[in-house]
Amino acid sequence: MEASREVFWNIQFGEIVYILAVFTIIVFIYALYKRYKLWKTGIPKFKLDNIGKRLWNFTVSAFVDGIFHRRFFGSASKQGRKGIFKRLLPTDFYPGIIHYFIFIGCIILLIGSFLDFISHYFLDFMHGGFYLGYSLVTDIAGTMIIIGVILAIIRRYVEKPERLDNKREDLIALLLIMAVVVSGFLVESIRIAATELQTNPEWAPWSPTSFVLAQAFIDLNQKTLSNWHLITWWLHSLVSLGAIIYVSLYWNRLWHIIFSTLNAFFRNLDTKGILSREDFSVGRHFGVSRIDDFTWKELLDLDACTRCGRCQEVCPAFTSGKPLNPKKVIQDLREILINSTNSSSKDSQRTGAPSASNDNPSLSDVITEEVLWECTTCGACIEVCPVFIEPLTKLIGIRRYLVEMKARFPEELLNFFENIEQRSNPWGIAPSERTKWAADIDIQSFESGNTEYLFFVGCAGAFDSRNRRVTLALTQILDSAGISWGILGKDEPCCGDSLRRLGNEFVFDRMVMENIAMFREKGIKKIITQCPHCFHTLKNDYRQYDIQLDVIHHSELINNLVREGRLEIKHTGNLGNVVFHDSCYLGRYNNIYKNPRKAILKITNQLPIEMERCYDRSFCCGGGGGRMWMEESVGKHINVLRVEEALQKNADSICVCCPYCMTMFEDGLKDKGAHTKVRVMDLAEIVAKAIERGKIK
Amino acid sequence: MLVIICIKQVPDTTQVKIDPVTGNLVREGVPFIMNPFDTHALEEGIRLKERYGFRVVVISMGPPNTEVTLRKALARGVDEAVLLSDRAFGGADTLATSKVLAEAIIQLTQREEVAIVLCGKQTIDGDTAQVGPGIATRLGYSQLTLVDHIKDIDLQAQKVIARRKLEGREEIVKADLPAMISVVREINTPRYPTVPLRLMAEGATITIWGNKEMKLDDASIGLQGSATQVRKIFSPERAKGEILGDGITNPEEAASLLIKELKRKGLLFI
């Protein structure tokens, strides 16, 4: 006799289970439809474009993130792992492995059940060696799930990591999974005790866990065994289907299986955290003041959240003791979404400022202004989210509402906004002083045809006395390499980065239109920037205005020049321990990690020292998202936290590639009293020191 | 009841340079802004609208491009903007300017009674602080200069109570309406415009009155009506004093020099 699968062994009218399953599926689909309707209350702005690319990305993440669980283990992205660069250990191995056990276990059992179904009704292949192998694999899968659930319970209720907030639904979810799997094991072990152990005991060990369990039932007589089997079989069937019905009706977190998967498919394919343009026609409502002002994709984001807390763990605002917690933002918004009832009257309420008297609870009660303005837009929350949620775009949507509709923002920003509008720079300095940094050198104005690159100096590079030295260093490099460049001088505008991140989209919008008109008129196509914020804004934000600029940040350019041998390195070393800091807008936003490191390697003959948090896990200096222009009055100073991290590595020099980082680090060092021992240098300064002027190869 | 705010578009003086050779103002490429003191008058006008329900009209005399500044005023929430623009108004000093502005106010009075005329305490280009008082005198309004707080307006009794910020003291005064009030910066913090108002302002119509509408005697306006005439513009020589150290390249040394000098003169004790 050959080992084979006996479906409905000992069970009469087993097919009733199919009827129950159909009912379960109806409940499930109905619930999903209700959710779909809820998401549809959002504005339909999000375009479902690039289906091919989406499918491809989705398939890739199904394999990479599903089978290898990269996003769950928290391994660094590709840029952080290749070649000679530091291999980053997974930051979330423990939670990753728990999820992996449960996830892979469930996937195997699902496939197993499917194969069983096929074999039973269509092709009879569940016998012999295949069946024994099948038994082994599914038994191991079930065991993995049990181990996973136990570990999860230990983690949640014994270890209690800070990032997890335990709700009743979490325990229910784990217990449901446990109940399904344990009841399954019971059925199987009783069956084994009743059949295999008596007829073919050599088969039984192929289901190792059930085999062990079966020993408990071995002394029972055949009648009792088959009764127990009958009971547990129905129990298992009902628990499994009941679990799905329960999850469907009570919106248990297990919905993440569907929602997070959908979110992976509908994810933002553009640059991380890119903000959408607003339509500024008369009579419209601007920004987000109600939950249905979000796009449907943003609402899906809210449902996709599994409350894993990775974002809160990396958020510079949260970890420095500020009231902003990205996870809480998403969860609070989700709460509003769920409580929002019928919003079909949305259009009629759109005429004036939204009133508090409508059905939807007000966003401002939940996402308070104390929370809202703390975001540095560093993008760490987006980077670590395993399910592609973008918390910061939601915050900026709400900032837009406050700035554009209410003119309400921290008072420090009033001057900032007026300065930008009046004089196109954050400090309100006269534009005629934009060229002061070049008082002692010869510079050329950009002229299409005569100069290849526009050197977009940026406000900090032009006005901030410390960063002017970086500007000069960069011009030395450009000249040594024989690059043809020119500047716009007093006509150079602010790129508008902080305006956009602060939610002043209207002024940003008008400014960009003026700026690109000038770029077009002057024939500007290739731009060198020294500020990652200018870089990102000109490259990625301006793209939304149908202008494709070829923008290069100096860290990329310098590395290219070094690699091509266009810069003659005269002096090496002498910098001591160089600790490198990744700027958010270079690294996370634009995936530039290796270029500055390679350049440092060439010059110092060694790779820079990495801080604990580096590459895509880098920690913000605290200056992004308009925070540069605001007071930091709550909690610890973000820049000081980062400086402390650099000091732990015995830094002699801290290498930055961003004027904001420069200011934040210098201030932080002064705060720690370490500014006499440690200096902050821009990459351009390090390189300029290493070359001698005029030696063009 | 009307509140009328008089504003002026001025060159952004921080960006004005004086040609070292000719001694003339280099005005080319210098952007125009709303006179900073007037932004506070504007804000106060809008606040009075919110407090008492006045209709607020902003008026300005200047070249056609003053429209830009008037739209900024509209974006902050005033109800109407009137531009007084005519070649015949050009070259006016404070005497001729106040003539035109006063006449415009008279014409507005014919439509609706005026309660308050608000001005900035002075402009940053002329710095005379004469236009506000000139208007008040011509119209026979109460004249309250250097006001840093409007306490109350009693429409029944036709009185306004305001606080004037004077050197080293303040004065709380009660005056009859209508009154001309010129304000100092301390009176308020001007608001930031909301987008719906900005968009409204972009599309709003600005009333333009030339001398055809105003019908003023040519001899009383513009250059002809001006009692003063500009002969020369120059930066005054520094009469005395000296520059210590080099504060630009070596601020620390300059600061210690300054401290030493102040100590020497007995002005600083540490």
Image (cartoon, rainbow, N blue to C red):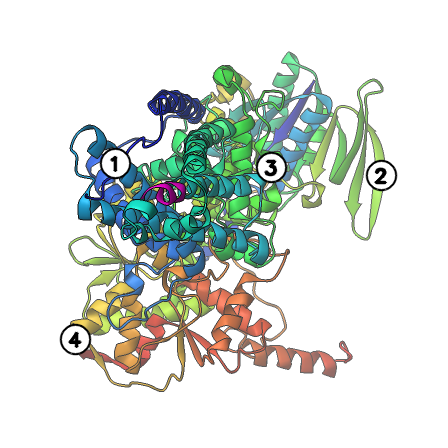
User: How far, Cα to Cα, is label 3 from label 2?
Assistant: 44 Å
Label 2, on which residue?
Answer: B172
Q: Residues within 10 Å of mark 2 (few under 14, many from 20)?
A: few
Which residue is painted at 49% across and 66% down in the image? A663
**What range is drawn magenta here?**
A189-195
Which of the pair A381/B72 is nearer the observer?
A381
Q: Residues within 10 Å of mark 4 (few under 14, many from 20)?
A: few
Query: What's the residue type where badge 1 is placed?
Result: Asp
Q: Is residue A551 left or right of residue A145?
A: left
User: How far, Cα to Cα, is label 1 from label 2?
Assistant: 93 Å
Tell me, yes or no, whether dots 3 and 2 are on the same chain.
no
Of the residues tagged 4 and 1, which is closer to the observer? 1
Which of the pair A242/B250 is nearer the observer?
A242
In the image, is residue A193 part of the stretch drawn in magenta? yes
Q: Label 2 lies in what chain?
A: B
| Prevailing secondary structure of the magenta residues | helix
Which of the pair A197/A486 is nearer the observer?
A197
The x, y position of residue A655, in whole percent, is 39, 72
Of the residues tagged 3 and 2, which is closer to the observer? 3
Badge number at residue A565: 4
- The image shows residue B1, relative to residue A651, as above or below, that is above
Residue B10 visible in image: no
